[in-house]
Structure formats: C-alpha cells, structure tokens
Amino acid sequence: MRHVLSLLCLGFLLSACVPSVEAPETSSATDTLASHKNGTGPLAEFATCLTDSGAVFYGTEWCPHCKKQKAMFGDALGNVPYIDCDANRSTCQKEGITGYPTWKFKNGAVLSGTQPLSDLAKQTGCVLPDNMKI
C-alpha cells in the first residue's frame, strides 16, 4: 500500500512540476511546440535548438523512460519539442511511433529509448553547454 501511495505522490509531483504539451487533436504539432517555448536554465538554448532543428520527442506522461528523458532538461523542459502520444494519438500513429520515448529528426533518423543529451546534439548539430558535456 505504501508503494502505491508513493507512486501516486510521485506521479502528482511530476505532473505538477513537469510542463508537457497536451494539445487537442485539432492542433498541429508545430503549433503545439511553438506555444510552449518558455523554459529557462543552462539547457534552454540547447532545447530550443532541438526544436529549431526539427527534432521531436514523442512520449507519454506514464512512461518512466520518458520521465527520465524529461528530467535531463531540468528547467528547460518547456523548450523541448515534446508530443504527448496519449493526448495526440492520431499524430503519433501517423508518425509510426510504437514505443516511448522516441526521437525523430528532420534527416529521417529515429532514436528509441532514453537518449543521452550528447547523442541528441550529434543528431542535430545543437551545442550542449560546456558544463553539460561528458
């Protein structure tokens, strides 16, 4: 019972603290992404570059790997090009998303699973802040 309560509390905290893009099906992915650029912190420029490069992160709110990927962006999560596949099922089906998280890139590359920020940088040419490079 304690485990269930802990998970519920964690889910509540994450949903309250982690902004996500939950647009109605009628919104385009581009409109959704553009309206949620509001992050700050050292990764804000990197996250904005990911969006500008055409990269898109597909996930769900319940996916633990998606939560881990989101946490990597800290305060800059609002700048990340994120599509919630529960809220945008038809978009994700059209894009062929079958697992979470999935990153799709303008060049046609697709990466599945939690990705190191350095791999996202390599795919997009976006520059990580010096203190984030490993």
Image: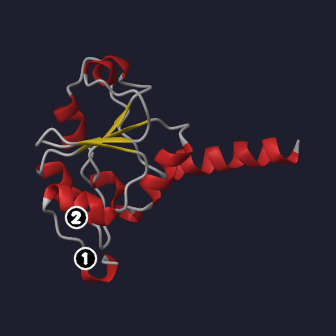
On the image, the x and y values in percent for residue 129 come to 25, 76
Measuring from the top left, give residue 5's x and y in whole percent.
79, 44
Residue 88: x percent and y percent? 35, 24
Q: Which residue, as the protein is rendered here, is positioned at the far right?
A: 1
- Residue 125 visible from this viewpoint: yes
Circle number at residue 77:
none
Query: Mark 2 sits on what residue?
Result: 46
How many other residues sit within 10 Å of disc 1, few (<14), some (14-19) or many (≥20)? few
Contact, mark 1 vs mark 2 (Cβ under 8 Å): yes
Report the amino acid beneath label 1. Answer: Pro
Residue beneath label 1, please?
Answer: 129
Locate residue 134: give its quadrant: bottom left
Q: Classify mark 2: helix, strand or loop.
A: helix
Residue 35 visible in the displayed image = no
Residue shown at 26% from the left, 19% from the top: 94
Q: Which amino acid type is shown beneath numbered disc 2? A: Phe
Left or right position of 75 against 16:
left
Which of disc 2 and disc 1 is earlier in sequence?
2
The residue that appears at 12% across and 42% down in the rendered structure is 106
Tell me: residue 84, above or below residue 90: below
Report how far apart the C-alphas of labels 1 and 2 lie in the structure: 8 Å
| Viewer-side residue, 126 vs 88 | 126
Disc 1 on helix, strand or loop? loop
Model colouring: secondary structure
Residue at 29%, 66% in the rendered image: 118
